[in-house]
Amino acid sequence: MFVKTFCSTVSGIDARTITVEVNCSVGVNTYIVGLPEQAVKESQQRIISAFDNNGLRMPGRKIVVNLAPADLRKEGSHYDLPIAVGILAASSQIKADNIGKYIILGELSLDGSISPIKGALPIAVAALKDGFEGVILPRANAREAAVVHKLKVYGVENIRDVIEILNEESAIEPTVVNTREEYYANLENFDFDFIDVKGQASVKRALEIAAAGGHNVLMIGSPGSGKSMLAKRMPTIMPPMTLAEALEATKIHSVAGKIGTQGGLLTARPFRAPHHIISDVALVGGGSSPMPGEISLAHNGILFLDELPEFNRHVLEVMRQPLEERQITIARSRYKVDYPANFMLIAAMNPCPCGYSTHPDKECTCSAAQIMRYMGKISGPLLDRIDIHIEVQPVAIDSMAAKRSGETSADVRARVIAARELQTARFGAENSTFSNSMMTPDELENHCRLDSATLHLLKTAMSRMGLSARAYDKILKVARTIADLAAADNIAENHVAEAISYRNLDREGWLWK
């Protein structure tokens, strides 16, 4: 008997439907064809054990399983369940009438229980797009897939549950998630608040500008000055993700297996803080079985690199293209995938190896050569791609002992949202430019025009500081954001002057001031 079941494979952050063709005929042995890799080939032994432990019968006949399209390499253990269901249907042990309505996925354990898979959300999105009625997958992935409406999502724990659903004998109800309710309920849930940070008014101002325009930031300061504390509070002042952004971020985390057992939609902007020993593959993605890296997991959120000079220089250099293109293309001999990487880079570093060259009280023990060598670990092209360089000074003891005061994250966030709304109106809701940091050269020319006095100020700064053309563009973009926070139609001299002040590493001799 010939039967078709359906499952999916993930490429990048999108899924593609795979047809599992099972033919049961006269003969012996089982064959799995269609470019299966080792984990798929091993499914035969898992299926036989699962059948034995659940009172099911492995047909004593010739079984040929074809995974179509046959020219696409099949990887992963989630093919176990659709192959097992196809064998049961082909040997008339279950009804075959309803099999074509569902995408079926899951890894079988030897006792017949079903283990979680990766990529449940993009698979559910593809299933709805391709016209399937529902998805049958591990219960641990049910809430994740149920984010997609108008699709019946059945979470199962054992192969027996699957048989009952297909035989229409099951009491299992489809999993339902109210996506909008969940989205709005968790928008304001944060563990940190800007009001926790004492002092640091100038740094808070710089981070507010960064959040308002989507600008990359480098904080330079002595150990204990509060760089990490400030960075962790950045998501609390950023505009909330739209539903489309939340869905895209959730898909990436789903593919990487980072959703967890609770499932559901990611509502807070991602905050990723990899250790400085990370490899370039772990940062940008790839591997023998391609997976998103940290820059893609930070998509629509923040990538925080603490102790920036301690990262391998090659690892940092591979970020240059994603910072410009806002996506990463992983090309290998066996595959080519694209992952989105529209993240805000927040980096922190000490000003010298000992950390105290700019400290107001402690004495630095580093020589000029050591400091230059330390700073030289960060290349000029990478620094050019960071819009704001801000110095973080230690907080005075009196300020530390004072009670919490100042603005909350909600206060700052309100101004950031207002500035982003001006940018949306300027660029258009359907434009691919969402913030000032993403402006194209044409948009920069149209929206960042300067009067003669302001232009003279910028030219003077460019000449004295020896800035590159990219740094020139960055200053204009930051100035445009400062003007937006002030609700100003045009960029004024004070806006450009403030933007120039955030190029600390371009100022000659600032380490020895």
Image (spheres, rainbow, N blue to C red):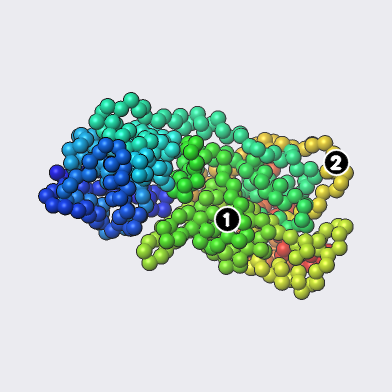
For the point 68% across and 70% down, the residue is: 376
User: Measured from the top left, where is residue 402 in percent x and y?
Assistant: 85, 39
Assign the N terminus to one quadrant of the image.
Answer: top left
Q: Secondary structure at mark 1?
A: helix
Q: Quadrant of residue 353?
A: bottom right
The label shown at residue 444 is: 1
For the C terminus, the quadrant is bottom right
Tell me the tag on residue 321. none
Mark 2 residue type = Ala
Which one is nearer the viewer's eye here, 3 or 178? 3
Of circles 2 and 1, the one toward us is: 2
Q: How many marks?
A: 2
Position above or below: 60 against 289:
above
Location of residue 194 in the rendering, given as x and y in whole percent from the top left corner = 71, 40
Q: Is residue 304 visible?
A: yes
According to the picture, the residue beneath numbered tag 2 turns out to be 401
Q: Is residue 471 above or below residue 116?
A: below
Residue depicted at 20% across the width and 47% down the height:
22
Q: Are marks 2 and 1 in contact (CB under 8 Å)?
A: no
Q: Quadrant of residue 457?
A: bottom right
Q: Position of residue 393 (x, y in %)?
A: 80, 53
Instruction: Describe residue 316's horizontal placement relative to residue 366 as left or right.
Output: left
Give the secondary structure at mark 2: helix
Q: Is residue 103 visible?
A: no
Q: Give the distance between the C-alpha atoms of the residues marked 2 and 1, in whole angstroms.
A: 45 Å
